[in-house]
Image (cartoon, rainbow, N blue to C red):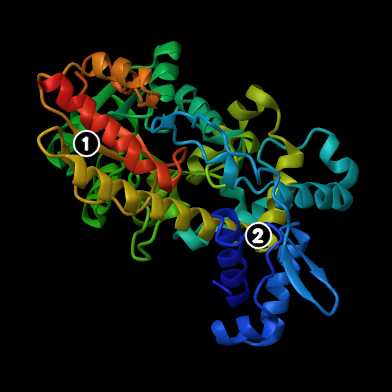
């Protein structure tokens, strides 16, 4: 990360968490240049960016000051719910001002091009930007193999309906898996198969048996930061999945929706090991905001034409305005700065969650080994604990957890686990929320 971005992020975080109060004078340029071991011009650039985002203001011959926050002086008497159920980005972290600038810039740059029908594949200039951007995730491809979609959900819908070169019809899912995709497959009456996934991964012998004996056109998987488990595959498992896909001519649909939260620089996607048999899906909504509705599908060449035809019939094109704004957001360096901010924030929350789960576990549940990246983790509760009753009792205490029944195919029984996400719970409230969960479990166990 550039030094000016580090300064920017540090000051922004201190303003948000109250360490720097509204109207408080900020350190001088000289003080920060010493503290961060950088040139004064670097500090000036950071302060200029903060001014442009309306977070601070300057007074000539006086210095820089924090802008008055809208919520200052308001002390609500009742806190909101402890929502551990949602993986959607935290609205408090949305880049409103940054993206407003990008939208305005996009309109000025492209004008009428954004308000007419585009192409099913996507804005050509964005496709070139994405080609370079995806290389940062070890996804090396050409613009002709990328399709911009209205979120990953649209890509999944197209893939479920379209025929594949292997002539097969069925879809294999991890169990548990993304509940909306399960419902979509049921709606389309696509043959579905399941394979159990745990914190340890999947049974690779079972995967090979399914690939060899069943009518499977693709295997849908979330290799890292699985929703709702939070766990990730080892590199060896990803390599073996890639090998089996090529051997049995089964495609992999790799949903890498939280790739931006990865801390391990040596962690590669399955795509890196079998690009001819992997459809790589990248979400931009998860790192920015859900309303963006922009995703990218990187397709093997033998799938591109069919995918394009099916997508065109579903919506002609995806929002050109959103695509142009995203292009500017990436090109300007804002995306990279945003990625670091989100990753740092969620990592701190996960650290608090891990600590709280361990401290409050006692005999109530079995905490996992620490998950340090992503947004999810899970705990295993006693087999005789009735989870629907627990969820209902917690809801009355304003603690919201996800019902995992919809994450399983009807042929699979849900495991005795609770999934917890950190995106909607602030750091300072995690401990209290976990304590409520642990106390209620202990109360039910007698």
Q: 10 Å neighbourhood of mark 1: few (<14), some, or many (≥20)?
A: some
- In the rendered image, the vertical position of residue 399 relative to residue 104, given as above or below: above
Residue at x 42%, y 31% (from the top left corner): 83
Q: 10 Å neighbourhood of mark 2: few (<14), some, or many (≥20)?
A: some
Of marks 2 and 1, which one's residue comes earlier in the chain?
2
The answer to whether 372 appears left or right of 59 in the picture is left
Q: Secondary structure at mark 1?
A: strand
| Picture coordinates of residue 109, whole percent (x, y) | 86, 53
- In the rendered image, the vertical position of residue 132 relative to residue 102, given as above or below: below
Which residue is tagged 1? 379
Residue at x 61%, y 29% (from the top left corner): 311
- In the rendered image, the vertical position of residue 36 relative to residue 262, given as above or below: below
- In the rendered image, the vertical position of residue 227 relative to residue 169, given as above or below: below
| Picture coordinates of residue 38, whole percent (x, y) | 60, 86
| Picture coordinates of residue 91, whole percent (x, y) | 58, 39
Q: Separation of disc 2 and disc 1 at Cα?
A: 36 Å
Residue at x 71%, y 64% (from the top left corner): 50
Q: Secondary structure at mark 2?
A: helix
Residue at x 31%, y 42% (from the top left corner): 230
Which residue is tagged 2? 334
The answer to whether 65 appears left or right of 236 in the picture is right
């Amino acid at each position: 990360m550039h030094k000016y971005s580090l300064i920017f992020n540090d000051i922004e975080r201190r303003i948000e968490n109250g360490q720097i109060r509204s109207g408080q004078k900020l350190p001088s340029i000289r003080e920060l240049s010493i503290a961060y071991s950088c040139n004064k011009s670097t500090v000036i650039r950071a302060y200029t960016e903060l001014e442009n985002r309306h977070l601070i203001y300057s007074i000539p011959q006086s210095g820089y000051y924090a802008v008055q926050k809208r919520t200052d002086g308001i002390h609500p008497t009742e806190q909101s719910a402890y929502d551990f159920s949602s993986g959607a980005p935290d609205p408090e972290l949305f880049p409103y001002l940054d993206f407003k600038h990008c939208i305005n810039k996009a309109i000025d740059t492209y004008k009428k091009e954004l308000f007419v029908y585009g192409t099913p594949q996507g804005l050509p200039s964005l496709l070139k930007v994405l080609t370079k951007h995806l290389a940062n995730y070890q996804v090396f491809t050409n613009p002709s193999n990328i399709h911009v979609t209205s979120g990953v959900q649209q890509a999944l819908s197209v893939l479920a309906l379209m025929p594949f070169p292997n002539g097969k019809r069925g879809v294999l899912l991890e169990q548990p898996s993304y509940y909306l995709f399960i419902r979509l497959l049921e709606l389309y009456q696509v043959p579905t198969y399941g394979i159990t996934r745990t914190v340890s991964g999947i049974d690779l012998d079972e995967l090979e048996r399914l690939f060899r004996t069943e009518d499977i056109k693709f295997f849908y998987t979330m290799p890292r930061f699985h929703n709702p488990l939070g766990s990730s595959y080892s590199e060896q498992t990803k390599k073996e999945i890639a090998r089996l896909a090529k051997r049995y001519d089964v495609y992999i649909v790799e949903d890498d929706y939280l790739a931006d939260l990865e801390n391990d620089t040596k962690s590669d996607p399955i795509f890196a090991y079998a690009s001819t048999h992997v459809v790589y899906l990248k979400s931009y909504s998860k790192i920015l905001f859900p309303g963006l509705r922009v995703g990218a599908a990187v397709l093997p060449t033998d799938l591109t034409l069919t995918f394009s035809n099916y997508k065109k019939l579903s919506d002609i094109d995806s929002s050109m305005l959103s695509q142009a704004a995203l292009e500017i957001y990436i090109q300007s360096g804002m995306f990279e700065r945003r990625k670091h901010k989100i990753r740092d924030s969620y990592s701190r929350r996960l650290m608090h969650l891990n600590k709280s789960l361990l401290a409050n576990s006692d005999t109530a549940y079995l905490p996992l080994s620490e998950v340090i990246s992503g947004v999810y983790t899970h705990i295993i509760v006693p087999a005789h604990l009735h989870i629907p009753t627990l969820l209902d009792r917690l809801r009355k205490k304003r603690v919201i957890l996800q019902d995992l029944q919809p994450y399983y195919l009807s042929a699979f029984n849900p495991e005795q686990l609770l999934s917890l996400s950190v995106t909607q719970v602030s750091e300072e409230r995690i401990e209290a929320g976990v304590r409520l969960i642990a106390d209620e479990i202990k109360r039910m166990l007698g």
